[in-house]
Structure formats: C-alpha cells, structure tokens
Image: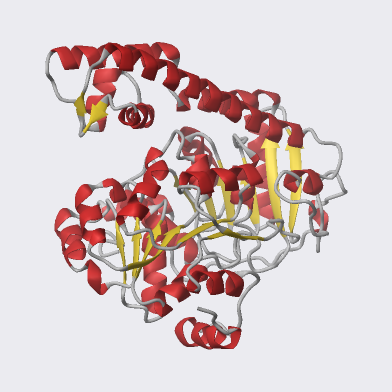
Amino acid sequence: MQVETTFLQEQLQQNFGYSSFRRGQAEIIRDILAGKNVLGILPTGSGKSICYQLPAKLLNGTTIVVSPLISLMIDQVKQLKAKQFKQVTAINSFMNREMRNSVLRKLHTYRLIYVSPELLQQQYVQGRLRNLKVSLFVIDEAHCISQWGHEFRPDYLKLQEVIMACKSPPVLALSATATPKVQEDIIYALGGKEFVKHIYPMDRPNIAFSVEQVENEDEKLVIMKRLFSQYRVPSLVYFSSRQAAEEVAQELASSLDLRIAVYHGGMEQQDRITIQQQFMNDQLDIICCTSAFGMGINKSNIHLVIHYHLTTQLEAYIQEIGRAGRDGEASVSLLLYSNKDIQLPKHIISRELPSKQELVFVFNKLKVLDDADKPLPIKEEEVVNCFDINEVQWRFIKYHLENHGIIKHNSIHFQQETWDHAFKQIYTYIEKRTMIKQAKLAEIIDWIYQQDCLRKHLYKGFQSSYQPPVFQCCSNCGFSWKDWQPQQTRRKGNTYSWQEQLKNKLLIGGANETT
C-alpha cells in the first residue's frame, strides 16, 4: 500500500513526539508498509529504530526485532514504554525461567518483540512464534550477520530458517556500517531475497580524527590524563583487552577528579546495565570499555572517543567513533598507537577460530564420545574441559558440524567419509576467514600510516564521497586540540564512583542498597 508522507508525519508526532523524519526514515517506512524487503544503511545516530518502531504501530500484526545485545533490548523497551508504547517486550537470557515463560505464553498480546538470535534457535520459542501473525521481521545492527555470524555468533546465519518458520514476512535489515561486500553478505544470509536498498552516507562531518603515535603504554596514559584534565566531556575509551580496560580505569580514577567506570563482557549483566544507565544519566564521565559497550547507545553528548588499542577492522572503528557527536557539536576521535600494538589484534584474529591442531583434537574427541555412546557436553565449562577450546570456537565448529549432518539434535552421527569431507571443508573455511580478517587488519594499519587526509581514506571503502568537515578535519590536515572548545559538563548532585556503587550493593545498609 502507498502511504502519504503527511499521514506518516502525523503518526510520528502522535506516537513518538517527533515533528519530522530524519533523512531516510520516511522512505524506508513507506517501502516496509508496502510489503517490500528493505536493506537500510544509515549513519549512527540517525534514528534507525524509528524505521521499525513506527511500522510496528501501524501494521496489523507483530514485529520481531533481532537485537545483538541484552542491554540494547532493555534500553529500547524502557524508552518505548516511557512513550506509552506498552505492547512491547524483550525475550532474553537475563530473564528468569518463570518470567520468560510468562512472556512467551502471552506473545500474541505484543506488537513489538525484541529477541536475540540465540534464543530464536530454541524450538519452544520458534513454536510460539509460529502461532503469531508476524508482519515484519527486523535484523537490527545487521552487519553482525557478516561481522559476527561466521565465527562469534553463528546463529546469525540461521535467521533465514526462523524467517521461514514465521511464514516469510517482509524483512528489514538495518546497519550503520556496511561495505557493498557486507551488504551482499547480509542479503545472501537472509536467503538471497530481493531487497530494496536505501543506502545513505555514513560520514560524520562534526567528528575530527586524530592519530597519535606513541612509544609505549605510559605515554598513552600521560596523553589521556592531560586531555581529561583539560576537557570534562562524556567520553569513551576503547580497549581490546579486558585487563587493560580495568587497569587503565583504575589508574585514571586514582589520578583524576572524574567519575570513571569500566565495562566489558566479563562483568555481570546487572552491573553492566547499571553502569550503562549511570552513563546515560550523566552520572559518569568516562567509560573504559571493550567493544561490548556502545551499540545502540543513544547518548547525544559524547564528544570524545579514544582508542587505546587498534580495532581489527575499519568497520568496528567507524561504529565506535560514531557514538560521538550525535548532537551535532564538535567532537574528536583519538587513536593512540605504538609499533607493538599490532600484536594484539593479530593475536585476537588467531584465537577467534580454532587452529588445525585444535580441529584435529575436536574431531578425535568426538569419535571417542561416539564410540562410547556419550552425549555432547552442553555447559561452557564442560566444552572447555572436553575439547580444550573456548566456547566461541566450539559454537563455530558445532554450527559447521550440524551443516554437515555430523551433529543432529546434540547427538553425534559418525561416518568416516562424511567426517573426512567435513574436516577439509571446515579447515578450508577457517583459512579463508582468517585471510579476510588479516586483510581487514591491513586496511586499518594502512589508514593509520596514511599521509593524505584521514577522513577521505576512512570512508572510501564504504562510499564514493564524503562531506567536508564542519569544524576540524584530521591530524593530517592541521587538527589542533587548542581549537577544540567543547562545552564542559558538570556533576549532578551526589553520585558515587562505579567502584562505590558495586561495593555498596554488596554491603548490608549500604548507601545504594536499594538501587
């Protein structure tokens, strides 16, 4: 059906309080309401969520949203309920069994349901979805299909099966960073359907880029202490190591009169949610974090993003710097690096997928289990003890063994010819993926050493042109800290550091016992 823009604007105002659409939103929504499959690439901070939240209000049925992070789901559900959109829920592993079963029993009462790709693979969840009239199937942060699906979260590659189980409703795939190759990867993983593409430039003209070479870690700390002493603005510092994030957060907190927290995937979920909410409410100044933080965070006044370590690819770097300057104010991305920094991303790439020796060990162990008629290990610690690999590597291997018919319903099916073929196929795939990752790492290293404009070369793999900077450009084009004069933030009332917050939660009668 064709929908007039004036009608959509009225609905936008009525349901969400916005007077007008941002670039790309109305075009995407019209195609969704017309029943088309849509691939939308819009820059960070451009309001991608409205592209499915408004249709969820207008369509006659349920909208399913595949979301990568629990904290992102919880935050979006909270925001929607604050706007009086009550028929929304999130199904995630943070819920206890009783709460989850309660939500699943009344799924038909919701118009918008957030869920992770892993939970979508549970047969009971799929069974409940089959009973719904699904009007729209959304993959938010769709680059995760390409970026994580091949290794870290293979359940992203199974979404096509879930879509078919939902009677093949129209599909909306949304992302902020996707090269033409990644766009192809997304569409292929979703069954090769015909998609209408709405691709918009992702460059952010209000972010200046500074790359500074240092001798060692101590020099990085000196630079950060100087900057944070001079500029009190909401800031993110990205690390590739959890330990480094914790150590630097502690060092900064002991040296600066700022509220500083650490955030990474190894922390308890509730603690991560608490820290995220404190940052959103301006109760924290700086987050020292891994890539686990930031996706879907709609905080407009982040004005400084520092990379303490190199990312493994430009896509991740663009996603992380895109969390700055969403209010349009002058913001800075600073990347600090020393010559030895290249070793960490190389190590990360080498450990994401199993080595040939580890693959041989897993196959031999599976044969032993099959001969002894023993079941596959299920819990993470059982997998580690049995196969001597981490859970991420096991998920990758298990996904491919299921594709080859060697594992069915968590039981082993041994046939020598099938096993030999599967081993060769999996190892060839590992080699291919490793080469792709190494090439992506080479791209960001080339960018760091670029003598020409950093802005120009950062976006050239994603789009044919870029907008001229509205403030300063980059360190190759004369960027100066002296010319950056952001508005400083002030503390709001009595607040506690993240260490005090967590400590008090464990003390009977602590200051924040009820929070």
For residue 391, above or below residue 27:
above
Instruction: Tell me how many marks there are.
Output: 0
Residue 484: x and y in percent read: 78, 59
Q: Does 39 sit left or right of 167 as displayed?
A: right
For residue 398, above or below residue 105:
above
Q: Does 215 sit left or right of 82 as displayed?
A: right
Residue 478: x and y in percent read: 87, 49
Question: Nearest the camera: 228 or 122?
Answer: 122
Q: Which quarter of the figure has residue 59?
A: bottom left
For residue 215, above or below residue 207:
above
Question: Nearest the camera: 189 or 383?
Answer: 189
Q: Does 203 sit left or right of 71 as displayed?
A: right
Residue 460: x and y in percent read: 76, 45
Q: Which quarter of the figure has residue 408?
A: top left
Question: Nearest the camera: 40 or 303?
Answer: 40
Residue furthest to the left in view is 373
Residue 25: x and y in percent read: 59, 71
Quadrant in which the C terminus is drawn: bottom left
Q: Does 354 sit left or right of 223 as displayed?
A: left
For residue 117, above or below residue 342:
below
| Residue 105 seen from this side | yes
| Residue at the (21%, 64%) spot, across then down | 103
| Residue at the (26%, 66%) spot, across then down | 132
| Residue at the (31%, 30%) spot, across then down | 402
| Residue 502 seen from this side | no
